[in-house]
Amino acid sequence: MRTVGLLIAFIFSIQVTDAQEAHRRWRKMNQIRNDKFDLILPEVMRENKIDMWIIMNREGSFDPLYQDMGAGYVGKTGYYIFTDHGERRIERAALGISGYLLEEGGTYDYFGSELELKSYVQERDPKAIGLNISQDIGGADGLSYSGYGELASILGQEYEKRFVSAEKLVSDFRSRRVASEIAVFAEACEIAYQITEKALSNEIITPGITTLEDVAWWMKEQMFERNLESSFGMPSVYVTGIRGIIATSSDRIIQRGDIIMIDWGVGLMNMYTDMKRMAYVLQEGELVVPDGIRNAFDKAVEVRTIIKETIKPGFTAKENETMIYEALIAKGFNKMKGFNQFTEEDITDVINGCHSVGNWGHGVGPSIAFFNPKRLEYVIQPTNLLSIELFAYTKLPEWGGKKLRVPLEDDAIVTERGVEWLYPINPRVLLIK
């Protein structure tokens, strides 16, 4: 009986600890939400000339900003509504959305029925009603075709004429960060890089035995144990060879002489990371990374340093991209015409992929990346979070002069001073003995 009692006490202690962690995370997310609604929302609504923002949700079909807004229980239809009366505080209401976690968060001024929508809007008579409609940014495109039709029918033609896209508003709201949000993102980054670097160690990998998917599933298990999420599904654990990627997160056994990369990120309290790490599996008798591989990595580090020192707030992402390539070319690097379009010349070919990060592994803010053409137009602002990502291709003597692609990626914040790292980045190739 004493054993049973001890077991029950142990289980209860775990439950209490879990409850404390759940409460801690909830409080932090409430703090972020209140700070963003107080500090960010007024400026971005006014910059985008939107005096009412309606975010529509249906049961089973939530807007991408559902977690940002506080989640909550939605019956058939619900709305988060924000109204700018020209005062310091933006009025906030939840119609048709309820629940303990939302209501106790202290974020909203009014909770009501979804049936109040028409009278609520008429009383405030907004000039421009922002809706989450976008052709270029998925995170700003939460309103469905039928949802639009329903809003137009309820509010009538007079207000339908005032509907505008909230695409830029969504980007600005999400990508400008408050201190509490940055603290949570940094916490997520700490967890992510520690798991990644442990995954590429002899604690997890035994050459000749461990497979790529063994490593990926170990990482997934770490996420499960810590109640983490990810934007990327299965972690990409891959081996690179002369002809490029050999295998990714498969049953391919890790061998001596392999060059292994990991690309993934974790999600914690609605903040998502994106990072890479690179490791080399020592051959029998080797003690250090071969010179060619080390040189290729060092070239990539040099590129990373140039990118970090070049990015400046107050310029568009496109202007920053131009400045980055001008600085790289001045230092003897070659700008590639497109991804993986490297040359045969004895020069390090580079493509920049610095993108927004934060509420997903690929965020919705200004992006200095060829794959986000719309957001190249947006101005880089202090507090924007960027994934400093690049791909550098350098010849390896060990491969008969064929080029190794070295991908580097770590998350950083833009400040008035430029770019600053949020955690220890990878300074060298990791070793697996």
Image (cartoon, helix red, strand yellow):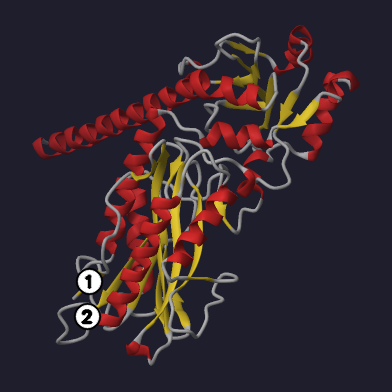
Residue 396 lies in quadrant: bottom left
Q: Is residue 63 above or below residue 212?
A: above
Asked if disc 1 and disc 2 are in contact, CB closer than 8 Å, the reply is: yes
380 relative position to 23: left or right: right
Q: Position of residue 287 (x, y in %)?
A: 15, 79
Q: Position of residue 8 (x, y in %)?
A: 20, 35
Residue 126 visible from this viewpoint: yes
Which residue is at 60% across, 58% downward?
371
| Residue at the front extreme of this rendering | 330
The quadrant of the rendering that contains the C terminus is: bottom left
Q: Is residue 11 above or below residue 290?
A: above
Residues packed near mark 1 inside 10 Å, few (<14), some (14 to 19) or many (20 plus): some
Q: Position of residue 202 (x, y in %)?
A: 20, 69
Q: Which numbered dot is residue 431?
A: 1
Reading the image, the residue beneath label 2 is: 282
Q: How many marks?
A: 2
Residues packed near mark 2 inside 10 Å, few (<14), some (14 to 19) or many (20 plus): many
Secondary structure state at the residue bearing disc 1: strand
> Disc 2 marks which amino acid?
Leu
Q: Is residue 285 above or below residue 306?
A: below
> Disc 1 marks which amino acid?
Leu
- Label whose residue precedes the other's in the sequence (1 or 2): 2
